């Protein structure tokens, strides 16, 4: 049996509507008069800030005054007396996008089934056992992915609160960053279905890794292990089909970024985005690390896929710079490799440098790196598109996981890495959360940004709000806007 009938809902809308206009007239009259009485740049700023604060106050005050009226009407209704018992009154605090809402509501039980419920919570669609509503949570999670959880809480508190108090540096409520981490932890982050790229004969795959500090309990380690630094290997892949240059700026075509901490990363993304049956040449651009070379054959899904390994210029020049401090010899070594392509001359010059060096063993390693990858280094000379993996790994992964002294748990790191990947690929994290925060693994929910269902923002065909949903409030606000 539903606790909300058509007549109850109509009366609730009327009470909410009347309260809204009553509160609006009381709160908004003075700011409007003040705004037009004093015209100056400073009064404009103050006026706009006051408008924002007063509009928020109107919504919050409307809820505060309307809730007891609506609850009292339900309490005295014949429908309630016939079907439900009044048990007790409990207080509740919810942070809405308009500000903090504190109110009291009555707890009822069904006379037949003894099931308990709050009529107000059902009517407005307030979630059970939550302090922050889903929209606030989505804003915080979205901004924490873009920046960090600590600043996200300050920024969002500012948006939800009083602007002028922020400007005056007065104290206002900060949302704890641990709370944001808990929301991500409890969120069953869905798989994202990306756009499928077709009709490409050529594919570039740039690869690199980023070592992320691991959060670990030292009590579980022996004395030797405690002295070591513990890291998680984050792997970043950037794929694209070509590049175009305009006004000296180069942009990658059909670019996609994939990030993971998995030990088997290669096949988990590429075949879902590109049509490998049509691809003939796959250029692998990297520092030719052992884990990358060991996995390159994973890219060969069909017989026509020809994987060509290319060692990035950045790492070659990095090792040359470490071999010698002489600018002349650095230029000469680079010219020998990329212009003359003379292996013997490189060996001769590098041996001269090593012979006069103090750290011969280390510089020999740099020389051997270049010799071991000589063919793949020369492959890069023939590429129309050069590697931009270093700026990509810096912006996509290092900025989020290496710019601050913070450790991550192996259990949770994949969630944070995936959210960062989604953000880089243009997925709206706020929308992703609102679409999936109440989903479970059993729902098999897949997010597709090109085919999103905005049903949570639409109005149902029925006039009755659903139990434990946002539909009740949606209907109230819709009717309120229509003046009915």
Image (cartoon, helix red, strand yellow):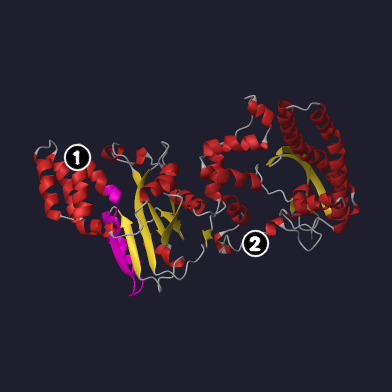
Question: Based on the displayed image, in which of its 4 quarters is residue 274 positioned?
Answer: bottom left
Q: At numbered mark 2, what does the secondary structure look like: helix, strand or loop? A: loop
Q: Which residue is drawn at 28% across and 40% down?
A: 225
Q: At numbered mark 1, what does the secondary structure look like: helix, strand or loop? A: helix
Mark whose residue sits in front, 2 or 1: 1
In the drawing, what numbered circle is on residue 328?
A: 1
Q: Which residue was labeled with disc 2?
A: 453
Q: Please state the horizontal and vertical placement of residue 162, each as a whole percent of the image.
A: 69, 32
Residue 271 belongs to magenta span: no
For mark 2, does the 10 Å Cα neighbourhood hold few (<14), some (14 to 19), or many (20 or more) residues?
few
Does 105 sit left or right of 228 as displayed?
right
Q: How many dots with numbers?
A: 2
Does 180 sit left or right of 479 as displayed?
left
Does 110 sit left or right of 396 as displayed?
right
Question: Based on the displayed image, in which of its 4 quarters is residue 88 positioned?
Answer: top right
Can you see residue 234?
Answer: no
Please provide the residue range marked out in magenta: 288-315
Q: Please state the horizontal and vertical placement of residue 270, each as a whole percent of the image.
A: 42, 64
Q: Which residue is drawn at 60% across and 58% down?
A: 439
Q: Please state the horizontal and vertical placement of residue 299, each as a whole percent of the image.
A: 35, 66
Does 185 sit left or right of 100 as displayed?
left
Marks 2 and 1, how far apart at CA: 61 Å
């Amino acid at each position: 049996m539903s606790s909300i009938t058509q007549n109850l809902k109509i009366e609730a809308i009327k009470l909410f509507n009347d309260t809204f206009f009553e509160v609006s007239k009381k709160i908004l009259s003075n700011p409007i008069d003040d705004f037009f009485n004093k015209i100056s740049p400073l009064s404009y700023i103050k006026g706009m800030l006051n408008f924002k604060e007063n509009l928020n106050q109107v919504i919050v005050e409307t809820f505060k005054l309307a809730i007891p009226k609506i609850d009292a009407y339900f309490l005295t209704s014949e429908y309630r007396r016939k079907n439900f018992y009044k048990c007790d009154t409990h207080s509740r605090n919810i942070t809405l996008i308009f500000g903090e809402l504190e109110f009291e509501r009555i707890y009822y039980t069904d006379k037949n089934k003894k099931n308990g419920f709050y009529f107000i919570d059902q009517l407005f669609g307030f979630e059970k056992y939550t302090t922050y509503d889903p929209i606030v949570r989505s804003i915080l999670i979205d901004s924490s992915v873009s920046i960090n959880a600590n600043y996200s809480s300050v920024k969002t508190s500012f948006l939800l609160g009083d602007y002028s108090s922020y400007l005056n540096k007065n104290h206002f409520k900060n949302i704890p960053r641990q709370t944001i981490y808990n929301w991500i932890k409890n969120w069953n982050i869905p798989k994202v279905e990306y756009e499928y790229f077709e009709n490409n004969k050529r594919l570039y795959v740039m690869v690199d890794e980023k070592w992320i500090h691991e959060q670990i309990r030292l009590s579980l380690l022996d004395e030797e292990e405690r002295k070591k630094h513990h890291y998680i290997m984050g792997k970043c892949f950037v794929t694209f089909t070509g590049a175009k240059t305009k006004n000296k700026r180069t942009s990658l075509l059909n670019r996609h970024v994939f990030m993971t901490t998995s030990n088997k990363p290669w096949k988990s993304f590429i075949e879902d985005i590109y049509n490998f049956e049509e691809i003939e040449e796959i250029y692998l651009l990297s520092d030719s690390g052992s884990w990358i070379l060991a996995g390159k054959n994973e890219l060969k899904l069909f017989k026509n896929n020809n994987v060509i390994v290319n060692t990035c210029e950045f790492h070659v020049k990095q090792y040359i710079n470490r071999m010698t401090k002489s600018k002349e010899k650095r230029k000469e070594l680079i010219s020998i490799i990329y212009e003359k392509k003379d292996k013997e001359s490189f060996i001769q010059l590098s041996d001269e440098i090593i012979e006069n060096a103090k750290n011969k063993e280390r510089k020999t390693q740099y020389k051997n790196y270049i010799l071991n990858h000589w063919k793949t280094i020369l492959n890069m000379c023939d590429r129309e598109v050069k590697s931009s993996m270093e700026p990509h790994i810096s912006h996509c992964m290092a900025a989020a996981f290496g710019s601050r002294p913070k450790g991550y748990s192996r259990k949770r790191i994949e969630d944070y890495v995936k959210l960062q990947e989604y953000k880089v690929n243009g997925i709206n994290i706020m929308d992703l959360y609102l679409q999936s925060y109440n989903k479970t693994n059993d729902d098999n929910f897949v997010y597709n940004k090109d085919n999103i269902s905005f049903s949570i923002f639409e109005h149902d065909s029925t006039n009755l709000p659903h139990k434990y949903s946002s539909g009740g409030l949606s209907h109230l606000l819709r009717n309120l806007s229509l003046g009915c």
